[in-house]
Image (cartoon, rainbow, N blue to C red):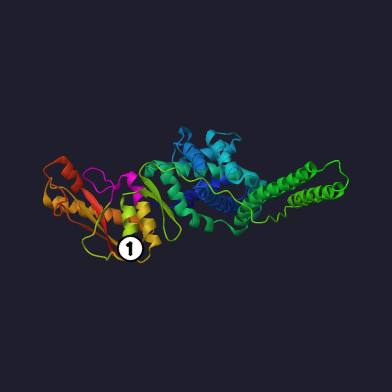
C-alpha cells in the first residue's frame, strides 16, 4: 500500500493543479508549490499528534463521517468547485477545523509563509484549508481500504511521521517547531509569573504592625513583582527563557483489549496483539539465545484472503504494515513466508493457492518498502497439517500463512 506521501503526490495531478490554480486565481506553478508544501506540513503535523487519543478520536470521526465518503480524487474536484464558486461545504469546514486544531495561533503564520514561498500571496490560508480537507479524504480512504480503527490509524501515522516531516520545507518546519516552543514557553512564563505573585502575596501576608520587618518585606514583594513584570516583558517580546520548562506528554492511545504498543529499535511504535505474530517475531529477533532454524514458524493472526483466492482482504493491511515496520527496524532480518491449506480439493490446486497467497503477502511487504531480497515465499499446500482435517476447526487451523526468520 502506498504511503500517505506517495498518495498525496499522485493526487496532485496536472488536472487537479490546473483547477486549483483557476479556483484560487493564482499561477499554476505557484499552486503546485503551495499544495506540495501544505500537504506534508498538514500530514506531518497529524502524524505528530498520533499519540494524542483525544485528537485521534476527533480525526477518526471526521475521516469516517458521511461527508467524507468519496474517493480522494473526486473529493478534491468537488472541493475546488466549491472554492471557485465562493461557497462552503462540510468537507471544507472540516479541513479548516483540522488546520486550526493542528496549528492554533501559528496557523496564519504558516499559511502566510507558504503563500510567500510559493508566490500565491494571500491565497495561502485558503489553500491550507483545502489541503486539510484533502488530507481528511485520504485518511478516510486509508481507514476504509485498510479496515483501520483509531489505534491502527495512529500506528500507521506514527510509522510515517519521519518521512512526512522530511518533506516539509525547511522554513515551514522551523515555524512548526517555533509554534511548539512558543506554547511551552507561554506555559512556563505563566508558571513563573504565578510563582512571583505568590511570593509577593506570601510576603505581604507576613507583614505585622511592627515597624522593623515592614520595609524589607515590602522590598521583597517589589522584587517578586519586578520578576513577574520582567517575565511578562520577555513574553511580549517573544523572547521567553524559561528554566527547564515542563511540557505535558501527549495522552496515550487507548489500547483495545489484548493489544499493546511495541516500540522498535528505530523509535517506531506498532500496535499489535499481545500474543500475535508481531510480538512473537520481535521477541525471537531480540533473543540472542534463540538461533535461526528451519522449524520455528510464527502464524499470522490477522492476515486474511478472499475465499479460494490469493487476494488479500483490506483488514490484512494493518498486520502487514506492522511486519514491514519490524523489517525496517531490524535491517539484518530476513523472512520466509509460507502458505498452507487444508486437504479439501485437489492437492495440486491447494499447492498453487498456498504459493500464490505466500507470494501475495511478500509482494505487499515489498510495496511497503521491504527489499525483495530479504523475503522468500513458498507454498506447502496441505502437506504440513497442524490439526486433523476431519473437523471444521482443524481445517481452519490448517488454512494459514506463517513466517520464519531466515536471518537475524
Left or right of residue 243: residue 150: left
Between 408 and 223, the one nearer to me in the picture:
223
Q: Main secondary structure of the magenta part?
A: loop
The structure residue drawn at horizontal position 38% and vertical position 51%, both measured from the top left corner, is 1
> Could you tell me residue 271's position as x and y percent?
40, 49
Q: Which picture quadrant has residue 380?
A: bottom left
Left or right position of 359 against 184:
left
Residue 363 seen in render: yes
Image coordinates of residue 119 in percent, x first then y, are: 65, 53
Nearer to me, 92 or 329: 329
Label 1, on which residue? 287
* Residue 378 image point, x, y percent: 22, 58
Q: Give the residue at x 59% y 35%.
A: 85
The answer to whether 161 is drawn above or below residue 293 in the figure is: above
- Left or right, 187 with respect to 320, comes to right
Residue 25 seen: no
Query: Looking at the image, is 408 positioned above or below residue 61?
Result: below
Can residue 313 be found in the magenta stretch? yes
Judge whether residue 119 is colored magenta: no
Determine whether the residue tagged by mark 1 lies in a helix, strand or loop: loop
Q: Position of residue 333 (x, y in %)?
A: 33, 64
- Quadrant, the C terminus: bottom left
Task: Please provide the residue range marked out in magenta.
Answer: 300-319
Q: Residue visible at 31% across and 50% down?
A: 276
Total count of labels: 1
Mark 1 closeness class: few <14, some 14–19, many ≥20 residues within 10 Å: few
Q: Is residue 73 or residue 292 the one in the foreground?
A: 292
Instruction: Between residue 277 and residue 130, name the one nearer to us.
Output: 277
Which residue is located at x 81 percent, y 47 percent? 221
Left or right for 21, reference 208: left
Amino acid at each position: 500500500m502506498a504511503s500517505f506521501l506517495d498518495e498525496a503526490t499522485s493526487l496532485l495531478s496536472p488536472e487537479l493543479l490546473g483547477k486549483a490554480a483557476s479556483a484560487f486565481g493564482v499561477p499554476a506553478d505557484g499552486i503546485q508549490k503551495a499544495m506540495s508544501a501544505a500537504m506534508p506540513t498538514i500530514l506531518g503535523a497529524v502524524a505528530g499528534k498520533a499519540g494524542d487519543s483525544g485528537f485521534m478520536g476527533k480525526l477518526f470521526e471526521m475521516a469516517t463521517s458521511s461527508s467524507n465518503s468519496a474517493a480522494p480524487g473526486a473529493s478534491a474536484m468537488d472541493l475546488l468547485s466549491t472554492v471557485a464558486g465562493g461557497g462552503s461545504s462540510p468537507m471544507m469546514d472540516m479541513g479548516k477545523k483540522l488546520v486550526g486544531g493542528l496549528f492554533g495561533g501559528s496557523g496564519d503564520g504558516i499559511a502566510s509563509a507558504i503563500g510567500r514561498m510559493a508566490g500565491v500571496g494571500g491565497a495561502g490560508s485558503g489553500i491550507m484549508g483545502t489541503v486539510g480537507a484533502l488530507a481528511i479524504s485520504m485518511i478516510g480512504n486509508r481507514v476504509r481500504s485498510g479496515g483501520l480503527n483509531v489505534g491502527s490509524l495512529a500506528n500507521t501515522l506514527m510509522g510515517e511521521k519521519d518521512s512526512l516531516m522530511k518533506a516539509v520545507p525547511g522554513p515551514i518546519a522551523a515555524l512548526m517547531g517555533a509554534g511548539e516552543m512558543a506554547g511551552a514557553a507561554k506555559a512556563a512564563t505563566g508558571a513563573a509569573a504565578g510563582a512571583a505573585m505568590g511570593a509577593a502575596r506570601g510576603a505581604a501576608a507576613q507583614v505585622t504592625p511592627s515597624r522593623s520587618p515592614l520595609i524589607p518585606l515590602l522590598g521583597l514583594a517589589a522584587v517578586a513583582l519586578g520578576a513577574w513584570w520582567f517575565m511578562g516583558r520577555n513574553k511580549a517580546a517573544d523572547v521567553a527563557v524559561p528554566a527547564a520548562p515542563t511540557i505535558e506528554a501527549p495522552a496515550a492511545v487507548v489500547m483495545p483489549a489484548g493489544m499493546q504498543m511495541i516500540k522498535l529499535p528505530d523509535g517506531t511504535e506498532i500496535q499489535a496483539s499481545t500474543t500475535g505474530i508481531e510480538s512473537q517475531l520481535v521477541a525471537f529477533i531480540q533473543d540472542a539465545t534463540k538461533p535461526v532454524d528451519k522449524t520455528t514458524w510464527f502464524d499470522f493472526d490477522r492476515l486474511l484472503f478472499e475465499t479460494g483466492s490469493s487476494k488479500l482482504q483490506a483488514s490484512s493491511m494493518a498486520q502487514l504494515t506492522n511486519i514491514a515496520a519490524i523489517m525496517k527496524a531490524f535491517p539484518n532480518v530476513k523472512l520466509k513466508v509460507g502458505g498452507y491449506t487444508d486437504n479439501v480439493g485437489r492437492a495440486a490446486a491447494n499447492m498453487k493457492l498456498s504459493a500464490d497467497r505466500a507470494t501475495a503477502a511478500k509482494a505487499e511487504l515489498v510495496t511497503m518498502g521491504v527489499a525483495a531480497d530479504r523475503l522468500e515465499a513458498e507454498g506447502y499446500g496441505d502437506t504440513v497439517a497442524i490439526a486433523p482435517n476431519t473437523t471444521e476447526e482443524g481445517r481452519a487451523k490448517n488454512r494459514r500463512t506463517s513466517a520464519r526468520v531466515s536471518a537475524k
